[in-house]
Image (cartoon, grey):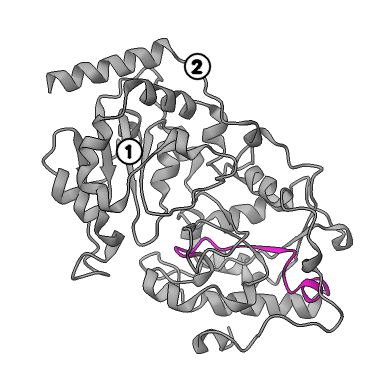
Amino acid sequence: MVVCHITFFIITLLSWLMKQEGSAGDVLEDDPVGRLKVYVYELPPKYNKNILAKDSRCLKHMFATEIFIHRFLLSSAVRTLNPEEADWFYTPVYTTCDLTPWGHPLTTKSPRMMRSVIQYISKRWPYWNRTEGADHFFVTPHDFGACFYFQEAKAIERGVLPVLRRATLVQTFGQKHHVCLKEGSITIPPYTPPHKMRTHFVPPETPRSIFVYFRGLFYDTSNDPEGGYYARGARASVWENFKNNPMFDISTDHPPTYYEDMQRSVFCLCPLGWAPWSPRLVEAVVFGCIPVIIADDIVLPFADAIPWEEIGVFVAEDDVTKLDTILTSIPMEEILRKQRLLANPSMKQAMLFPQPAEPRDAFHQILNGLARKLPHGKGVFLKPGQKVLNWTEGDPADLKPW
């Protein structure tokens, strides 16, 4: 343990002496204003405002991006009130805001709500019909995006809601070669409250005396009573192998010093849960804790702008038993380099949805992602009378009226 403490002291000292901002890349600095125009559909309040008025919890949970993106776009410089000059069309529907008493989205209602709102805009405006959604984007922050289910097997069985197959999906879920990640989707960070996080910043010279940190579930006995299915067994393996390891500060407890503890840690575990993503990734980046990403084939937020391979550590789910060896084998020079990159304000800013919006934040990164898709290709606009989507396709329960 003495050797460990000496190592932590050296890392802290060198971090302080070598304090300089790493480069996050020029892409994070892009300004989307002037590069695209977005038309925001005016919808009946039953699709957004009324749902939020019924349950204010929607403003605080990790799916809240759909609400704050709507608010941001209403006052954004990229918004146009003339749909004829729009590059993109946005439909502000809050499909995750109809919550159970336990705070989980009612996934049985979400697909029906989405179908209903698309029927509404297709009857009221001509723009959906001319492309069947190919120049429209939707925010779908469910566990498995527009597959609208929290358990992977059922999500795979459902697939992406058929009426969204031509649209661009802005979603937290991202995994390579997965039916719930449609080609061309924009993967974004989950919502974490920026104002709350910023009130917990500690002085930058605070020693990082915790080697590995994690707080959260290792088992989900209520939804996975037999064990092994939740997190594909990766979290259970972390607990079973390292619960008694003094280098690992891991627990199900969520202390009031959680944010401060992350800033005192060198590595923060970011394992998959029911889905591969979680708010821990955002928290780790914002608090300068090197994220240890345990989620095979994950597609990370704004991967075309953020150098994840340089700031994080990727551990295969099958290699969780070797976590201690993997992390202690990383050279100190590499740890310091990752910490310098994480110290870059642009890196942190890109993971947050502050209100009001700020330059280079996650709102602007989404717009940058949409701007990089322009101009639209020839296949976007359909010929007169041409139909591609099949409105009778999908789960029979989804076809019922909302």
Q: Nearer the viewer, residue 309 or 33?
A: 309
Mark 2–mark 1 Cα distance, whole angstroms, equals 22 Å
Furthest-top residue in view? 17
Residue that badge 1 annotates: 268
Residue 19 inside the magenta-drawn segment? no
Residue type at mark 2: give it.
Gln
Name the residue at 78% across, 59% down. 376
Disc on the earlier residue, 2 or 1: 2
Q: Is residue 349 visible?
A: yes
Q: Which residues are magenta?
A: 126-144
Q: Is residue 286 visible?
A: no
Q: Nearer the viewer, residue 325 or 306?
A: 325
What x and y, as percent, mark residue 10? 28, 14
Q: Nearer the viewer, residue 262 or 199?
A: 262
Q: Is residue 123 left or right of residue 92?
A: right
Residue type at mark 1: give it.
Cys
* Secondary element type, mark 1: strand
